Image (cartoon, coloured by chain):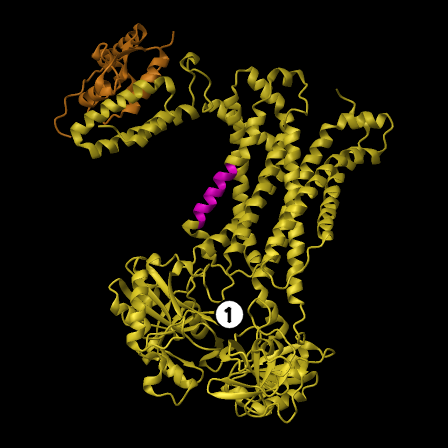
């Protein structure tokens, strides 16, 4: 019967080697005896307890070492209390004595760790999306793929019958949740003062509360979401509408038409959830909402009643027994679709993937990007590396000051292991300090940092075990790395040389330190180069010629409730001084996805998907979109006519004769009456696509009925704020039901590049940090070199050297290193950026001057850093520096 | 020479080492002391005490023969040194002389 092996190994570790045999023998004998007496389980417990007792014993021996006959021990143990106290003392005195170095060391390291922690926090947040659900690995969602012509279309919505039908046909499906979202902006009202635009209003099956882990604060999960016209609020929403009152039992008004009864309050969904909501209404309310949009819909035509298994309007999630069920479901699916008479387009393909893979996978319009995550992680690692290198190079540079100590310790009989242990321990101490400081920094820097990067992360995420573990791993890595090189180098000094006083600076250290400096500046220069290029590319994307005027265009969404006053509003707006033109279109460009129609080219018979935009006849003039062939004024805005853009004409294969061609959209045929120049309109990150514009008369109020937007161009000379204020007044004068909300066209356009812009700001912030840390290190090294060469400088000055020549002498060394770094860093940055830019259709060329600038900038900063020390050294009176020998 | 201070527990361990006459090692001592005093003694405490006693020169030790139940490991067998014996005797003498000066020896207590 062997005792617990882990405990045994632990015993071996803590027990003095020459005592191990008898102690272990005793322990084993005792163990066997106890097994017979009290049984194996309790004997194991006792064994563990006894081992812990021995650990306590050896700890006590070590901390409060009593005098022993030294012959009892083969060598002075590192874990000897007197020595330990001495190490601690010396370490502490050193930290206090060389305050600047300590500050640079700890500060630099803390900054590096803090920045890495912040990035880690972000990366872990992204990577743990949807992992918080209790049965996260059993939740799957379905989406469809469709190849249409050259385009691939994806949709994560299926018909209402889809989920239940799949559940009935497959035993492995434990539960189904269908989630519907509302279209466009809705207004929720509880009182005249409390009405807001809402875009996170979802409708869900009662199983929503069972399958997902969104806990209820109030209300019962058994009864919630069962009755139609009931709704659950999140805590934040409840507070917004009801303050501190209890919302349960009260009603909210949806778009001024429907009343929902509040039956409960949900905890706010975590920021790392793909299912986001502020309101969850029962799915049975869906037909009522559908009826607002289409009053004449029959009972059996509403989406919820659709008995076909096909694509549709409900996000559908399955709770499966195991992931193996997905294949089985997909096998039964064609049968189900056929039996129900589902009418999907040819080539539709359904895919079921785990919920946890959604965020970084096929996520339908999220800004997440797993490749950028890896870049972020890489940057975090680089900055941490810089900080650690900084620490190592400063510590070893100061080694000469500790060399005598090492020498004396060695003469007194310290072995290399003890010394290595001592310096490792010292590093641990400093790293520990730095880590604590970093935690404070993280707390302070988090809000501005995430604001800058436009990240939305729950503050409570910092206290999750996942992040705690990552922080711990980071700490251990730092401790291990930071101590390694200094410990090896410092403990290697030969006592004879050191004590003779000829500790030459050539001893290993400087070469390695030079390499360190080169690495640091390679990284800095690389990062500077990358951030300049990324910034350029983002600017390039945002300033590209769009083919329309976007700079001072205010977009004002309107809706059906304005139908009556639509003309009045337009008229009023045109009267406002500062307003140049007013037009209307069916959507907010760059913000809302338009609709896509499928049609066939009458000449080539090819299937083509085409974007549709309804506009009024002022649109082209207001946004200054030029015509290629301007339609006859009588034909523009006539019924059954359409205007195409140039790409559409090309894709249709109309050649030079687009006018007069007939195109069918659904059941209607329309004649092409004009061609516009291409202008950029989608929020999809790439080049132009075919577009068909249905033009209506300026006076037609259809634009309001279908929920369009007004485009108000403001004169370049007008005061923007004042004009917006006047527009707001005009808007309120017509007693609009909806709150006044507007966008500027250039801002909505810029937000398309949110993830690129985020990368750009991230890069510039981190480049700043990296450069700062590198300069801290350089500053320390320069100070140290200057100090070491005090005598040399004194002699040079006595012999007639000028201050300038001494500054050059001290700086030249470092400059050489930075130039090497420039030579290494530039190609690396070039290569990285080349790879990144490959993905853009519309991109900049990498110019050589970017790297020259990066190098120049770095050199300037480095020279500034070094010369501060160099000048100080050069100005010392030689009489002082040479006085004592 | 001033007598080395001996703790109460050390005294019991030292006495038990003497009682076991050359067969004293960790486990045997633990069991003997548990049996005789009824205290819950643990192996590490015995080892600590033995180490202290050896440092003070009151016991000496040598390695015994390997036995199977210890996985072939040897025992460290402790014996009391002359100095240890004298210390024990001195303690005993001090106690006896103090007891003898007690005017009113305690009566055995039957109920408490």
Q: Residues within 10 Å of mark 1 (few under 14, many from 20)?
A: few
Taking the magenta stretch, the answer to whether it contains residue A609 is no
Quarter of the image with the N terminus of chain A in it: top left
In the image shown, does A337 or A227 lie closer to the viewer?
A337
Give SS at disc 1. loop
- Farthest residue, direction left: B110
- Is residue A524 toward the left or the right of residue A215 in the image? right
Q: What residue is disc 1 on?
A: A150
In the image shown, does A774 or A535 lie closer to the viewer?
A535
In the image shown, does A101 or A603 lie closer to the viewer?
A603
- Farthest residue, direction bottom: A634
* Vertical position of residue A842 compared to residue A43: above or below: below
Position in image of residue A143 (x %, y %):
40, 67
* Residue pictured at 21% horizontal, 12% vertical: B19
Q: To which quarter of the image does residue A127 belong?
A: bottom left
* Residue pictured at 47% horizontal, 74% vertical: A199
- Is residue A304 toward the left or the right of residue A660 in the image? left
* Vertical position of residue A733 compared to residue A207: above or below: below
In the image shown, does A341 or A54 lie closer to the viewer?
A341
* Vertical position of residue A573 compared to residue B109: above or below: below
| Magenta highlight range | A467-479
Quarter of the image with the C terminus of chain A in it: top right
Position in image of residue A112 (x %, y %):
57, 45
Position in image of residue A328 (x %, y %):
29, 62
Taking the magenta stretch, the answer to whether it contains residue A478 is yes
Q: Colour of chain B?
A: orange
**Principal SS element in the magenta part?**
helix
Q: Specify the subunit that label 1 lies on.
A: A
- Is residue A593 toward the left or the right of residue A830 in the image? left
How many numbered marks are there?
1
Does residue A490 appear in this view?
yes
Q: Colour of chain A?
A: yellow
């Amino acid at each position: 019967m062997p005792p617990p092996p882990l405990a045994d190994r632990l015993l071996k570790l803590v027990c003095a080697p020459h005592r191990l045999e008898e102690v272990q023998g005793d322990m084993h004998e005792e163990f066997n005896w106890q097994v017979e007496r009290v049984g194996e389980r309790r004997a194991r417990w006792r064994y563990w307890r006894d081992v812990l007792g021995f650990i306590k014993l050896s700890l006590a021996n070590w901390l409060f070492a009593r005098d022993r006959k030294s012959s009892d021990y083969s060598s002075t143990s590192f874990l000897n209390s007197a020595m330990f106290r001495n190490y601690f003392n010396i370490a502490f005195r050193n930290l206090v004595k060389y305050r600047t170095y300590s500050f640079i060391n700890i500060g630099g390291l803390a900054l590096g760790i803090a920045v890495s922690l912040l990035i880690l926090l972000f990366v872990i947040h992204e990577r743990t999306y949807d992992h918080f659900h209790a049965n996260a690995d059993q939740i799957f969602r379905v989406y469809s793929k469709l190849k249409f012509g050259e385009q691939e279309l994806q949709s994560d919505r299926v018909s209402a019958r889809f989920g239940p039908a799949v559940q009935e046909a497959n035993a492995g499906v434990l539960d189904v949740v269908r989630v519907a979202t509302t279209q466009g902006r809705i207004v929720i009202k509880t009182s005249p003062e409390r009405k807001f635009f809402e875009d996170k209003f979802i409708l869900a099956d009662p199983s929503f509360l069972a399958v997902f882990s969104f806990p209820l604060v109030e209300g019962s999960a058994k009864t919630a979401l069962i009755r139609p016209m009931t709704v659950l609020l999140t805590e934040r929403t409840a507070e917004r509408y009801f303050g501190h009152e209890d919302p349960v039992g009260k009603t909210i008004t949806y778009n001024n038409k429907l009343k929902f009864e509040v039956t409960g309050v949900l905890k706010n969904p975590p920021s790392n959830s793909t299912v986001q909501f502020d309101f969850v209404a029962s799915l049975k309310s869906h037909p009522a909402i559908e009826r607002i949009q289409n009053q004449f819909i029959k009972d059996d035509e509403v989406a919820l009643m659709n008995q076909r298994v096909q694509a549709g309007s409900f996000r559908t999630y399955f709770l499966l027994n195991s992931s193996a069920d997905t294949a089985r479901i997909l096998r039964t699916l064609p049968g189900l679709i056929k039996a129900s008479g589902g009418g999907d387009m040819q080539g539709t393909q359904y895919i079921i993937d785990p919920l946890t893979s959604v965020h970084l996978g096929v996520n339908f319009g999220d800004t997440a990007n797993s490749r950028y995550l890896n870049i972020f992680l890489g940057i975090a690692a680089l900055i941490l590396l810089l900080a650690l290198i900084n620490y190592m190079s400063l510590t070893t540079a100061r080694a000469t000051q500790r060399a005598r100590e090492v020498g004396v310790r060695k003469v007194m009989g310290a072995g290399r292991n003890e010394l290595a242990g001592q310096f490792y321990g010292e590093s641990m101490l400093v790293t520990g300090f730095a880590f604590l400081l970093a935690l404070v920094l993280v707390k302070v820097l988090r809000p501005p940092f995430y604001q800058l990067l436009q990240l939305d992360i729950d503050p409570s995420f910092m206290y999750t075990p996942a992040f705690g573990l990552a922080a711990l791993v980071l700490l251990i890595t730092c401790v291990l790395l930071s101590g390694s090189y200094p410990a090896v180098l410092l403990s290697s000094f030969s006592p004879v040389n050191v004590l003779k006083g000829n500790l030459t600076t050539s001893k290993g250290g400087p070469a390695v330190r030079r390499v360190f400096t080169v690495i640091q500046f390679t990284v800095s220069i690389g990062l500077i180069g990358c951030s300049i290029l990324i910034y350029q590319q983002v600017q390039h994307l945002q300033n590209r010629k769009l083919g329309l005027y976007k700079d001072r265009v205010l977009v004002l969404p309107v809706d059906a409730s304005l139908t009556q006053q639509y003309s009045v509003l337009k008229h009023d707006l045109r009267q406002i001084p500062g307003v140049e033109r007013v037009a209307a279109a069916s959507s907010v460009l760059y913000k809302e996805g338009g609709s896509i129609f499928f049609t066939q080219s009458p000449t080539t018979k090819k299937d083509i998907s085409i974007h549709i935009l309804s506009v009024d006849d002022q649109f082209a003039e207001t946004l200054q979109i030029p015509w290629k062939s301007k339609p006859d004024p009588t034909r523009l805005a006539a019924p059954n006519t359409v205007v195409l853009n140039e790409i559409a004409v090309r894709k249709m294969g109309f050649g030079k004769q687009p006018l007069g061609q007939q195109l069918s959209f659904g059941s209607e045929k329309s004649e092409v009456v004009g061609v516009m120049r291409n202008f950029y309109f989608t929020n999809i990150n790439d080049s132009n696509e075919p577009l068909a514009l249905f033009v209506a008369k300026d006076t037609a109020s259809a634009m309001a009925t279908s929920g369009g937007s007004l485009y108000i161009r403001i004169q370049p000379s007008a005061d923007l704020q004042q004009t917006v204020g006047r527009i707001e007044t005009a808007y309120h004068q017509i007693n609009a039901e909806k709150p006044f909300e507007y966008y500027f066209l250039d801002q909505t356009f810029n937000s398309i590049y949110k993830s690129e812009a985020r990368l750009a700001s991230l890069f510039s912030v981190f480049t700043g940090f990296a450069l700062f840390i590198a300069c801290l290190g350089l500053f320390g090294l320069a100070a140290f070199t200057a100090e070491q060469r005090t005598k040399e400088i004194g002699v040079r000055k006595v012999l007639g050297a000028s201050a300038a020549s001494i500054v050059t002498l001290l700086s030249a060394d470092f400059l050489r290193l930075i130039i090497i770094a420039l030579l290494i860093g530039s190609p690396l940055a070039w290569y990285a950026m080349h790879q990144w830019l490959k993905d853009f259709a519309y991109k900049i060329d990498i110019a050589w001057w970017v790297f020259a600038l990066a190098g120049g900038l770095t050199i300037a900063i480095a020279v500034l850093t070094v010369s501060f020390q160099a000048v100080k050294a050069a100005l010392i009176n030689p009489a002082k520096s040479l006085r004592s020998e | 020479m001033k007598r080395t201070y001996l703790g109460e527990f050390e005294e019991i361990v030292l006495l038990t080492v003497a009682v076991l006459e050359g067969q004293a090692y960790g486990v045997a001592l633990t069991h003997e002391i548990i049996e005789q005093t009824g205290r819950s003694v643990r192996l590490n405490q015995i080892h600590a005490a033995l180490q202290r006693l050896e440092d003070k020169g009151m016991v000496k030790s040598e390695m015994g023969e390997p036995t199977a139940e210890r996985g072939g490991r040897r025992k460290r067998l402790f014996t009391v040194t002359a100095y240890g014996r004298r210390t024990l005797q001195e303690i005993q003498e001090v106690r006896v002389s103090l007891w003898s000066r007690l005017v009113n020896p305690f009566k055995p207590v039957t109920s408490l």
